[in-house]
Image (cartoon, rainbow, N blue to C red):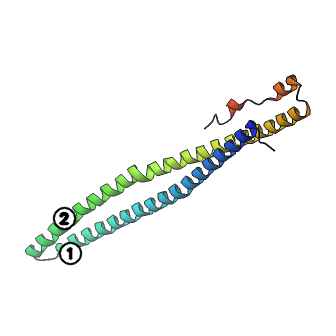
Amino acid sequence: MESSPRRETVDRWNAQTKQLQTAVSNVEKHFGELCQIFAAYVRKTARLRDKADLLVNEINAYAATETPHLKLGLMNFADEFAKLQDYRQAEVERLEAKVVEPLKAYGTIVKMKRDDLKATFTARNREAKQLTQLERTRQRNPSDRHVILSQKPHEEWLFESI
């Protein structure tokens, strides 16, 4: 049996929809994992910064109890170490602003696209059902154009939300 052009269209729509579903699922899986890993990295970097701040405070406390030369050396070391932690703080802030937040926003976009895809899939199924009914009507009454034209689906509605 030879397939009709409408059947080929439905098959093409099925293939496109499945491809889009696969792409959205793939993005959901991998971007979710990336977001979690980056967030964990930022948290650990922030904890390391906090521990270094405690270390600087302890070095300063120890320096206060030592001789002037050792005190000066310890305070200089603590000052330089604190400057390193300022860079670590900037790293944490940049990672949160430039990596983690955009990934979170992208997650929302992916969810909206998933919803759009569901709506499209529903419309495609409805369209396929209408095409099947149209083919049945054509087979039963090939000469009755009035009935056939009244059942013809509007193909331009399909995939309009994508």
Position of 24 with respect to 151 (left or right) is left
Q: Amino acid at mark 1?
A: Tyr
Q: Which residue sits at x=8%, y=74%?
A: 69
Which of 25 and 5 lies nearest the eye of the viewer?
A: 5
Instruction: Please identify the quarter of the rendering in which residue 162 is found.
Output: top right
User: What is the secondary structure assignment of the residue under circle 2?
Assistant: helix
Q: Residue furthest bottom?
A: 66
Q: Where in the figure is residue 10, as x and y percent of width and height?
A: 72, 41
Q: Which residue is mark 1?
A: 62
**Residue 157 image offset from top left, x and y in percent:** 69, 31
User: Quick check: 30 above or below 116?
Assistant: below
Query: Observer-nearest residue: 25 or 103?
Result: 25
Q: Earlier in the sequence, mark 1 or mark 2?
A: 1
Q: Which element is circle 1 on? A: helix
Q: Is residue 36 above or below residue 117?
A: below
Q: Position of residue 55 (x, y in %)?
A: 27, 71
Outermost residue to the front: 1
Residue beneath label 2, please? 80
Residue furthest toward the right? 140
Q: Residue at x 66, y 47 (%)?
A: 15
Mark 1, mark 2: which one is toward the viewer? 2
